[in-house]
Amino acid sequence: MTAQVFDPGDPACWLARGRSTEHAAAISRAWRTYPDLDPTAPLDLRMKRSRARVAAMRSIHETMRLETERNRVAANFAFIEAQLAAGRADPRFPLILRARDVHALGWDEAVAFADGHYAATAGWEPRSHAFECAPAAAAYDFGFRAGGGCPDDLFDTARRAFSAVASQPAAQGAGSSAPPRPLPSCWSAPTDAPRPVRWTRRLLIMDMVHADMFAAELDRQGLSDRPVILLMDSDHGFCSPDAPDDWCPNPTRWTQSRDFEDMLIAVEEQCLAFLDAVASSIPLCRTMERVRNSAIQRRSQFRLWLGRGLAQGEVRASGHIRWGKVTQGLYGRLGEFTARYTGPHLPRGHRIIVEVAPGLAATGYRSPAGRTLEPELIISNRARLRVEMTTLLRQFAAALRYP
């Protein structure tokens, strides 16, 4: 077979496309058994021949899928074993192997078991299973209970959190004086799940690359209050944007007298080693995140983080907003409320309405400060559609219903 000739009945055709010898032989056999008919043959006969070939190859494709899955699981478990042998183990790694060896769980279920077990021993609340498949959710609950968790106990989380804190000094060892803390390189990416925080209690650490990238995003927000912003350089340390030539080896100068609740790190991957080295001088707070992956994803994550900022006197609810699109337009759901884009509004603008049920507007709601919330909003710029819908949903979810 040459590169210019495609002969599906020749096993070499499929070998050249990455198939194994057995799979290439089976696929080529099916093509030889059910070859394409001549283009002049009746359409119904040609369609019947194609359906017969598809049916004959269905078992081949299923065998290939199962083999691919087995290779994936084997490679993942081999990676865990190699990390343990090299001494670079995550606390969940032994639990993953335990789930495989003792409880005969597959890879996805073993990871869920390890997550549940670790959450129970660390004193965390059990996570929600709203977006998980049933086997993974069951494995997580199994691991959570195996780690000492009891979701039916009202004081379970407080009890486990107290036990986890009480056991920390013994786990650190007598020669360790620094408290354990998650390194910045291990922080998760921003989401819309954490609760909103006032801008004055937020900290943003950026390198020069991200400072240029996100400056326009900050300006576009039109904020009256801004977070505490620090610029970072691996060779010089940290500085404030107001004094770009005044560098310090750590951020203590700007953070030691402040109390933060939300922190974001936006730096290149090569800068994370420097941040890990000075992690003890970075303040601990409730939500610590860093942007990850490609530039487009980082910009999207940064917008999520910006969306959690609160202005003075503003009250908004937290939680994950579920977005969707139907023929009528974009919609988002948070709790009992649905914000829906209904289309252009004459003479100009775009209309958004908040509903508590299909066709029933969310009327009679007021903010905690007593301001009446209108379920209908007209905006002039469609590019801000998702931002305005997010604000509306979080305002209504934090509102009070008045008769």
Image: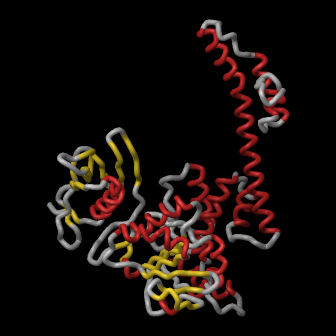
**Residue shown at the point (56%, 54%) measured from the top left:** 137
* Residue nearest the observer in this picture, 362 or 198: 198
What is the total number of numbered labels drawn onto the structure image?
A: 0
Q: Is residue 173 above or below residue 401?
A: below
**Residue shown at the point (55%, 49%) measured from the top left:** 133
Image coordinates for residue 306, horizontal then vertical, percent: 41, 69
Q: Is residue 244 above or below residue 312?
A: below
**Residue shown at the point (73%, 51%) measured from the top left:** 73
* Quarter of the image where the N terminus is located: top right
Image coordinates for residue 183, horizontal then vertical, percent: 62, 77
Q: Residue furthest front?
A: 245
**Residue shown at the point (83%, 28%) measured from the top left:** 2
* Residue nearest the observer in this picture, 52 or 377: 377
* Residue nearest the observer in this picture, 332 or 240: 240
Image coordinates for residue 268, horizontal then vertical, percent: 60, 71
Q: Is residue 139 above or below residue 317?
A: above
Which quadrant of the view contains residue 146? bottom right
* Coloring applied to the structure: secondary structure
Q: Residue furthest left?
A: 403
Q: Is residue 15 above or below residue 337?
A: above
Image coordinates for residue 403, horizontal then vertical, percent: 14, 60
Q: Is residue 25 left or right of residue 97?
A: right
